[in-house]
Image (cartoon, grey):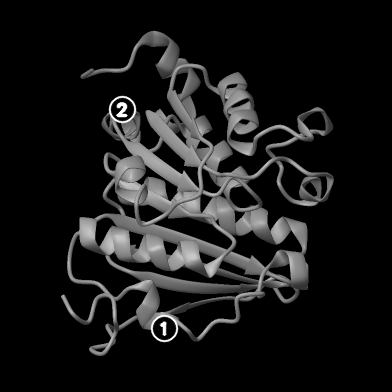
Amino acid sequence: MTELNDKERLRYSRHLLLKEVGEQGQLALKQAHVAVVGCGGLGSPALFYLAASGIGKLTFVDDDDVELSNLQRQILYKVNHLGQQKAKAAGKVLASLNNEITLVPIKARLTDKNVAELLRDADIVLDCSDNFTTRYLLNRYCHQASKVLIAGAAIATQGQLMCFDFRAESPCYACVFPEGSQTPVENCDNFGVISPLLGVIGAQQALLTINVLLGHHQGSVFCTLDAMSLQQKQYGLSKNPECECCGLR
């Protein structure tokens, strides 16, 4: 498809007015395939905005079911989704928002055995997971496959946004957080989280994804956000020559 149809021009008209997007940029979004791992507090806003923005194909992976405690922060879901598979419920909600894109919901937990099969065709991978096993797995896979990895995290009142562009030489997640340095129980279930923080970080993941697809962002970035002071800081990243992931490349 080399041009937008009339319905798409109307739907994405606010994008088309922007010199940073325009029709060619919207076509680039339409032709893109983005994979989101984790359909929870971060994946919910990220998926909402990616679907609304016209990403042509969205694959989203989660193996959990919707629980009542999720509704405080996982804005994709409603009371009538309780007990349903998150990926399936997310697919229904996103289809009601935009029925002109391809949605691929997958109920699965990523492993070394299935990660390549599930994510092979994606241009960009979003890590919206809530555990370090998945984070390190995605980091290794995206590094090996030379993909862009956009990772988010939020716990208590602190958020993180990271982009690792493995299409070129780049530091990786393990350069910043070496494997074995994290406590496995550090997650929202144990520490809690203020709900809008997940919305901010997840939306930033979607925004960064669009910027990468439009060619407005290259390279790696690491940002932190304090939800109480609203202070956001950006840090430079450098490769760790002793990193067990990218240091051996």
Q: Are marks 2 and 1 in contact (CB under 8 Å)?
A: no
Residue 23 got which mark?
2
Q: Earlier in the sequence, mark 2 or mark 1?
A: 2
The residue type indicated by label 1 comes to Pro
**Between 126 and 132, the one nearer to me in the picture:** 132
Question: In the image as oriented, which residue stretches furthest toward the bottom?
Answer: 242
**Between 76 and 66, the one nearer to me in the picture:** 66
- Picture quadrant of residue 71: top right
Task: Locate residue 202 relative to residue 17 in the image: left or right.
Answer: right
Q: Give the quarter of the figure containing the C terminus.
A: bottom left
**Between 43 and 245, the one nearer to me in the picture:** 245
Q: Residue at x 36, y 58 (%)?
A: 149
The residue type indicated by label 2 comes to Glu
Q: Position of residue 103 (x, y in %)?
A: 46, 27
Q: Position of residue 16 (x, y in %)?
A: 39, 29
* Residue count near mark 1 (Cα–Cα under 10 Å), binned few <14, some 14–19, many ≥20: some
Q: Residue at x 53, y 22 (%)?
A: 98
Q: Residue at x 26, y 49 (%)?
A: 215
- Picture quadrant of residue 179: bottom left
* Residue count near mark 2 (Cα–Cα under 10 Å), binned few <14, some 14–19, many ≥20: many
Q: Which residue is mark 1?
A: 178
Q: Residue at x 38, y 30 (%)?
A: 57
